[in-house]
Image (tube, rainbow, N blue to C red):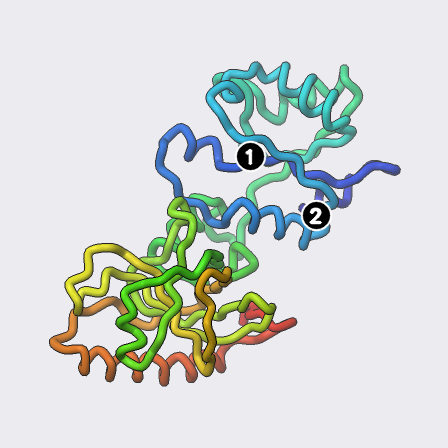
Amino acid sequence: MAETIKNRPAGGTSCVFTFDVPPEQYFKGKYGLITSFPGKVERFFAYGIEEVAWLPFTIEFASMEAEHFVRNILVRQLNAKHIVCGFDFRFGRGRAGDCAFLKEMGASLGFTVTEVGAVQVNGEEAISSTLIRRLISDGELEQAARYLGYFPTYSGRIVHGEGRGRLLGFPTANLQIDPRMVLPPEGVYLTWCTLPDGRGVPAVASIGKNPTFSGTVQTLEVYILDFSGDLYGERLEVQFLYRQRGIHKYESAAQLQEQIEEDVRIARQLLQRFHLQDGRIVLR
């Protein structure tokens, strides 16, 4: 992002070109999105990007020749004057286009190119979306957040669940999110929620199949601390901060209730480790 903004041409704008889904995941037919498409666009703008251009990724687009993409998309439609791309960027039919190809085309079409190398932290493994997905899947949320610059965040509509949380004294919001998102492993988590009115509040979230009640469907349920109100049908944003424990089957609802009380107590203690900025959790 910084290179794109730094190289913005005089009289022009900084723009990101992207797709609705990552091409490699489209071809595999197996998705593991780190952020939703609206969330991705929102972050582009938050970083200072002025425009976002995007297309739905399709098999027809994948068969487009690399030269056609440069001439008709980047130059004719976007009027690109300077292009920033990653060192491993590939595009066009058969992945024929790369940074070297862009530089060659730019020499004749009137644009320049900046190639960005791999990003490493303290000499560790190069940061990539593959690495971040693995960290989230393993529950390594703070490490994932170090590389992302923010904690893994999910946004979705609150729908009706089984209502068991309310019977236990801990009414939960059942969050319906994009099933293509990569989720942390099953467990109980300290989270931070942004309510529909913009307020930020702590919460305890559970990802699992409710084994105590012989559940078979994985759900994402959020118990918002010190909150009462009807949120059904509203959208909720949840940042996952810390994995407190795994999911266990309890012998009775009473035992589960005791465990949830303990989860809430621990969550309140853990929250003191994190810092707020503009009502949102930031890296500690």
- Mark 2 residue crowding within 10 angstroms, few (<14) / some (14–19) / many (20+): few
Residue 143, position as x, y percentages in the image:
45, 60
Residue type at mark 2: give it. Answer: Ala
Q: Residue at x 46, y 60 (%)?
A: 233
Q: Nearer the viewer, residue 76 or 144?
A: 76
Residue 219, position as x, y percentages in the image:
31, 59
Left or right: 90, with 157 as reference point: right
What residue is shown with label 2?
2
Q: Residue at x 76, y 18 (%)?
A: 107
Q: CA distance from mark 2 to mark 1?
A: 20 Å
Asked if the residue under mark 1 is in contact with the one under mark 2, i.e. CB atoms within 8 Å, the reply is no
Q: Nearer the viewer, residue 227 or 271?
A: 227
- Element class at badge 1: strand
In this rendering, the label closer to the viewer, 2 or 1:
1
What residue is shown with label 1?
19
The mark that comes first in sequence, 2 or 1, is 2
- Element class at badge 2: helix
Residue type at mark 1: give it. Answer: Phe
Residue 119 against residue 281 in the figure, above or below: above
Q: Residue at x 51, y 60 (%)?
A: 146
Residue 42 against residue 243 in the figure, above or below: above
Q: Residue furthest left?
A: 251
- Mark 1 residue crowding within 10 angstroms, few (<14) / some (14–19) / many (20+): few
Q: Residue at x 61, y 73 (%)?
A: 279
Left or right: 245, with 181 as reference point: left
